[in-house]
Image (cartoon, helix red, strand yellow):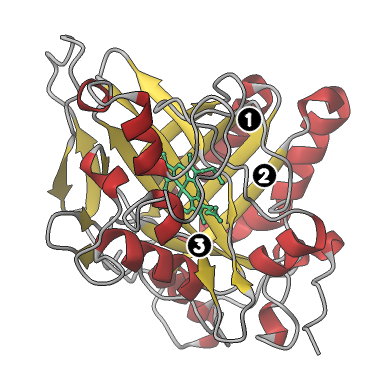
Amino acid sequence: MPEAVPDPAAAQPVVTPLTTAALILVATIEPGGESSVREVLPDLAAFARSIDFRVPDAGLACVTGFGSNAWDRLFAGPRPSSLHPFQELHGARHHAPATPGDLLLHVRGERMDACYEWAARLLDRLGGAVTVVDETQGFRYFDHRDLLGFVDGTENPIGAGARTAALVGPAADPAFAGGSYVIVQKYLHDLASWNTLSTEEQERVIGRTKQDDVELPDDVKPPNSHVALNTLTAPDGTAREILRANMPFGSFEQGDFGTYFIGYAADPDVTEQMLRNMFLGNPPGTYDRILDFSTAVTGTLFYAPSADFFDAPPPSPALSGTESLSQPASAPVARITVPADARDGSLHIGSLQESAQ
Ligand code: HEM
């Protein structure tokens, strides 16, 4: 018997339609900042309500997630069974880096001002307790296209299928049902190189037609196309799916143009299998050709608990005596740096520069 679909009322707004705007912030918690983070958690919903009531057309949807190391610094007791650090992947040609992140703030809506306001209130309360290490302002690009020109999001599951794909079910992990594992990666596109391909060749990279967004027939779709490598089937024949909330972003000043990948999953192994297919190849060596034109520069796994978790979070490990409040962040902070003179229109892939906190 299939597992009961998690009650959407108990979840954070993970299963929502794609919006015109999104603000995605990844932050690390400073040593000793844990109590400030814990204190603000019960107020997050109220921040959203006060914005939502005044600008209901904004359709504000805010999701907060915690990284694996942060979970142990913030909360005592049981932890989500599949929460672990993002698994870095080294393929023959391409690399999926793991980058630091204790908190994920995924703020979506029809108006960027509403997204900004929610994050501003939260970060104002947190003061120096956290450091934002990556910020992306995503926008809808025409009819849901990515900056490669292809419609992105078509085959996302919908309705009950979306909830089953994205939310932890009650049988899988009863204490953490209604939550979601979310993997985020920032991809920078080499648009100059991509635009040298003919439309037909680009379609063979993605596995769908560009103009009309129709999947290529199986006998035409190459095995190293993005769609072929990301279509997963369980041994019982059912589809293994995730819920994607990708957003295009771009900065003319920095020369960064890309896709911010956000994948929500009931089981992070589904997203991780997709990543293994993309970076290592399936069969090994048949890697995703999209990676020849798009480089992952960040990668972090978070668990976004159910909404009611925030009303009464588990006790602090400091109070329960299992951890020290001043335990330092276990990973260095990565910042994406781009040459200041990156104004010539070519794509400069930012290097990850580590600085110990
Ligand atoms: C550069 C980053 C990426 C871009 C530009 C991109 C773009 C696209 C596009 C255009 C499609 C076809 C339309 C659709 O069904 O949405 C697609 C499908 C899909 N992508 Fe991506 N994607 C990216 C990264 C990823 C990553 C990292 C994953 C998983 C870890 C992923 C998983 C999927 C899945 C599951 C599908 C649907 C496959 C199907 O069932 O047809 N994508 N993506």
Residue 115, numbered circle: 1
Query: How many angstroms separate mark 1 from mark 2 (CA)?
Result: 8 Å
Asked whether residue 117 appears in the rendered view, the answer is yes
Does the numbered disc 3 mark a residue whose Cβ is under 8 Å from ligand 1?
A: yes
Kind of residue sitting beneath label 3: Thr
Q: Which image quadrant is residue 170 in?
A: bottom right
Q: Position of residue 44 (x, y in %)?
A: 69, 48
Residue 218, numbered circle: none
Marks 1 and 3 close (CB-CB < 8 Å): no
Q: Which image quadrant is residue 257 in?
A: top left
Front disc: 2 or 3: 3
| Residue position marked by numbered label 3 in the rendering | 231
Kind of residue sitting beneath label 1: Cys
Is 50 left or right of 207, judged from the image as shown? right
Identified at 36% across, 70% down, the residue is: 85
Q: Is residue 88 above or below residue 219?
A: below
Query: How many angstroms separate mark 1 from mark 3 (CA)?
Result: 32 Å
Disc 2, SS: strand
Label 3: few (<14), some (14–19) or many (≥20) C-alpha neighbours in 10 Å: few
Identified at 42% across, 49% down, the residue is: 220
Badge 1 or badge 3: first in the primary sequence: 1
Towards the viewer: 302 or 33: 302
Towards the viewer: 11 or 223: 223
| Residue position marked by numbered label 2 in the rendering | 62
Q: Which image quadrant is residue 240 in?
A: bottom right
Identified at 12% across, 23% down, the residue is: 339
Query: How many angstroms separate mark 2 from mark 3 (CA)?
Result: 28 Å
Marks 2 and 3 close (CB-CB < 8 Å): no
Is 283 left or right of 350, judged from the image as shown? right
Marks 1 and 2 close (CB-CB < 8 Å): no
Asked whether residue 102 appears in the rendered view, the answer is no
